[in-house]
């Protein structure tokens, strides 16, 4: 019914929105959420290919991508908390030099 | 089979796809991180619905549980914990950032459109089977514990590393790499007027900063003239 291209196009547009967000946002948490959006766009591609070609491998990849995203969330938010504790700001412009 | 009326699956695709796109744009457009987080939950939920239309119920459930449940709760928790206010509207340090972002986005979309056109997936790809057991939990589990057992186990090591890293990074109190006892013994950067060490062994980074702030306030030390500070004044 639905061509595979529709899903791929939707995923490409979502990925692009995530890229734009990472480039133009300056709040560290919002940049972080844009990265999550990009991971999700790739997941949509994986699932679409998996169901259209009847192969379970794509969905296993999605599972592993989700695990990586969870690990990234834990470490990334830890880094964000550490930066906030040091600089009392979440603006990445304030964290442009790698010292206190 | 093809008639002018859109089928129910096309309607569902358009509905949830538009919802995902709208929520994603709202996420990037909002200045308040909390609203961005809520919009991102909307993206996750609509993507889970799209997974259901793709006959992948297991991935849809995992999407809701892991992303909308665990990860976003973590993000919202951090936003609340840090009490983040709205993004202050101040001049961008890199003023050409937004044009570059838009340009890169245009290039990326054009590239994706070109690839989709070139690949001609619409003609080459098989139609989605009416019923399939690919997305069911049983087939995913069978694949995960036979052919892909090693990646699965490596993933568990990754999770363990993330756990240790997150605890180390976010630990309250002593920051191990900055001011652990024994790390601050040689040539301290700051001396008090009396000549004693500003940083004593056992001081944390937080106490050191509080000390430096008081020194600056009382006029005993000059404020740092790092480029970052000048940026802030502007």
Image: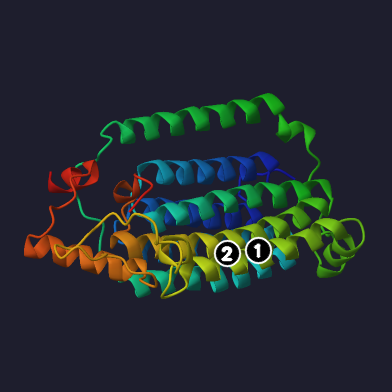
| Mark 2 secondary-structure assignment | helix
Q: Name the residue under label 2.
A: B165
Residue B84's place in the image compared with A7, above or below, is: below
Task: Please state the horizontal and vertical placement of residue A80, each as a whole percent of the image.
Answer: 42, 61
Q: Residue at point 81% right, 66% down?
A: B136
User: Mark number for residue B8?
Assistant: none
Q: Residue at point 48% right, 27% down?
A: B107
The residue most toward the left is: B219
Q: Mark 1 points at which residue?
A: B161
Q: Which chain carries label 1?
A: B
Q: Is residue A11 left or right of residue B131?
A: left
Question: Counting other residues with Cα less than 10 Å from the Cα at mark 2, is it few (<14), some (14-19), or many (20 or more)?
Answer: some
Residue B213's place in the image compared with B4, above or below, is: below
The C terminus of chain A appears in which quarter of the rendering? bottom left
Residue A19's place in the image compared with A27, above or below, is: above
Q: Which corner quadrant of the image does residue B82 belong to?
A: bottom left
Task: Please state the horizontal and vertical placement of residue B106, each as a whole percent of the image.
Answer: 45, 30
Q: Which corner quadrant of the image does residue B50 belong to?
A: bottom right
Q: In this view, does B85 lie to the left or right of B11?
A: left
Between residue B226 and residue A69, name the one nearer to us.
Answer: B226
Question: Counting other residues with Cα less than 10 Å from the Cα at mark 1, is it few (<14), some (14-19), or many (20 or more)?
Answer: few
Q: Determine if residue B18 is in view.
A: yes
User: Are dots 2 and 1 in contact, CB under 8 Å?
Assistant: yes
The residue most toward the right is: B146
| Mark 1 secondary-structure assignment | helix
Task: Please state the horizontal and vertical placement of residue B68, each as a whole percent of the image.
Answer: 54, 69
Residue B27's place in the image compared with B103, above or below, is: below
Q: Residue at point 42% right, 52% down?
A: A31
Q: Mark 2 and mark 1: span between their CA atoms?
A: 6 Å
Task: Please state the horizontal and vertical placement of residue B148, each as a whole percent of the image.
Answer: 86, 56
Q: In this view, does A72 lie to the left or right of A81?
A: right
């Amino acid at each position: 019914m639905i061509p595979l291209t529709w899903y791929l196009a939707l995923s490409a547009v979502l990925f692009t929105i995530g890229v734009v967000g990472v480039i133009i946002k300056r709040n560290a948490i919002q940049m972080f959420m844009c990265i999550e959006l990009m991971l999700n766009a790739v997941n949509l591609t994986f699932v679409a290919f998996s169901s259209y070609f009847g192969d379970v491998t794509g969905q296993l990849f999605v599972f592993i991508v989700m695990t990586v995203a969870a690990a990234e969330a834990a470490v990334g938010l830890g880094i964000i908390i550490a930066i906030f504790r040091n600089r009392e700001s979440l603006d990445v412009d304030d964290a442009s030099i790698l010292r206190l | 089979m093809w008639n002018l009326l859109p089928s129910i699956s096309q309607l569902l695709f358009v509905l949830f796809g538009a919802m995902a796109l709208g929520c994603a744009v709202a996420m990037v457009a909002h200045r308040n991180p909390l609203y961005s987080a809520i919009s991102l939950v909307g993206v996750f939920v609509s993507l889970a619905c799209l997974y259901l239309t793709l006959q992948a119920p297991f991935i849809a459930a995992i999407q809701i549980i892991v992303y909308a449940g665990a990860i976003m709760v973590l993000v919202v928790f951090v936003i609340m914990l840090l009490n983040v206010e709205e993004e202050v509207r101040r001049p961008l340090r890199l003023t050409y950032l937004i044009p570059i972002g838009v340009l890169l986005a245009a290039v990326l979309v054009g590239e994706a459109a070109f690839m989709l056109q070139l690949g001609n997936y619409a003609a080459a790809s098989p139609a989605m089977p009416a019923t399939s057991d690919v997305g069911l939990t049983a087939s995913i589990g069978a694949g995960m514990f036979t052919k892909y057992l090693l990646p699965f186990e490596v993933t568990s090591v990754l999770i363990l590393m993330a756990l240790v890293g997150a605890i180390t990074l976010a630990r309250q109190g002593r920051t191990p790499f900055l001011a652990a006892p024994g790390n601050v013994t040689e040539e301290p950067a700051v001396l008090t007027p009396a000549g004693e060490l500003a940083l004593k062994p056992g001081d944390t980074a937080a106490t050191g900063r509080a000390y430096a702030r008081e020194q600056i306030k009382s006029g005993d030390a000059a404020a740092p003239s790092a480029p970052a500070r000048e940026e802030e004044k502007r």
